[in-house]
Image: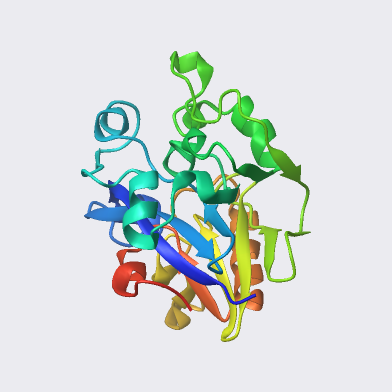
């Protein structure tokens, strides 16, 4: 199987760089970051990694300042950038279930949904109040994108097939996972929010830092170990909120 990985830009979220992307670096600097989803296809079978963000009104009311332009919804991006209709998607692999990674998931009515069991358990009952909005918890009086959906839950490493593997990368969320795709040019890891931007993996050797932490994390130790595991597996890392991934139309 020779897979192509296509980045899909479902909208823009404005974040404080030092609070979210690179911990302590760029505090107070506002950056516009893409809400990226991914299509994996061999031309015969088609998959998604995440389904991106919600519309502009909902993003601004419940989450961050954001903007989803006309044509930016995940199904529209899939058609315009990959030429694939929503009903042709066989499966959606969720890195995690934060609002900007699973909105509009019900548009893919023929797809099977895969997620780590720990992530689904927490998403259905986010017991830490700062994460109510991340998961659009019922206590807010709104309905999360995954409400009423059935998932195939996995626990740890899971080989979907000979070329696609999910593996745990917790830290940003309790049950975050990344997706490794074996290609002729090496393994590409779609990191989700385990890696926000390229700088996270570049680190700062002058400060003896192998990595630069992300700013939004639920467990620092797990975040750091996830960086290590991604680095161990990947020939190429695709971060979750870095506009530079759109410098190419597809990977590897």
Residue 219 as seen in the image, left or right of residue 168: left
> In this picture, is 173 found above or below 27?
above
Camera-side residue of 117 and 70: 70
Q: Position of residue 148 (x, y in %)?
A: 60, 23
- Residue found at x 69% / y 71%: 163
Q: Quadrant of the N terminus?
A: bottom right
Q: Is residue 174 visible?
A: no
Camera-side residue of 195 and 207: 195
Residue 156 as seen in the image, left or right of residue 203: right
Q: Position of residue 19 (x, y in %)?
A: 36, 50
> In this picture, is 230 found above or below 167?
below
- Residue found at x 72% / y 41%: 152
Quadrant for residue 227, please give it: bottom right
- Residue found at x 39% / y 61%: 82
Camera-side residue of 249 and 147: 249
Applied colour scheme: rainbow
Quadrant for residue 80, please give it: bottom left
- Number of numbered discs present? 0
- Residue found at x 56% / y 56%: 47
Q: Is residue 171 visible?
A: yes
């Amino acid at each position: 199987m020779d897979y192509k990985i296509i980045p899909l830009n479902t909208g823009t979220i404005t974040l404080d760089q030092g609070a979210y992307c690179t911990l302590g670096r760029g505090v107070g600097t506002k950056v516009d970051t893409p809400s990226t989803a991914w299509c994996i296809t061999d031309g015969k079978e088609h998959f998604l990694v995440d389904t991106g963000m919600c519309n502009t009104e909902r993003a601004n009311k419940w989450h961050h300042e954001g903007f989803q332009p006309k044509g930016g919804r995940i199904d529209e991006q899939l058609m315009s950038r990959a030429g694939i209709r929503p009903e042709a998607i066989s499966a959606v692999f969720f890195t995690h279930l934060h609002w900007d990674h699973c909105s509009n998931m019900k548009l893919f009515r023929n797809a099977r949904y895969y997620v780590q069991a720990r992530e689904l358990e927490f998403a259905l009952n986010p017991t830490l109040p700062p994460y109510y909005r991340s998961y659009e918890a019922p206590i807010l009086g709104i309905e999360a994108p995954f409400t009423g959906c059935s998932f195939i839950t996995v626990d740890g490493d899971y080989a979907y097939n000979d070329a696609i593997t999910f593996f745990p990368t917790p830290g940003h969320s309790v049950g975050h996972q990344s997706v490794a795709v074996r290609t002729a040019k090496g393994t590409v890891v779609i990191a989700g929010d385990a890696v926000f931007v390229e700088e996270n993996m570049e680190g700062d050797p002058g400060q003896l830092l192998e990595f630069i932490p992300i700013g939004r994390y639920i467990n620092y130790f797990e975040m750091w170990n996830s960086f290590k595991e991604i680095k161990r597996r990947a020939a190429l890392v695709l971060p979750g909120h870095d506009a530079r991934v759109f410098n190419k139309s597809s990977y590897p």
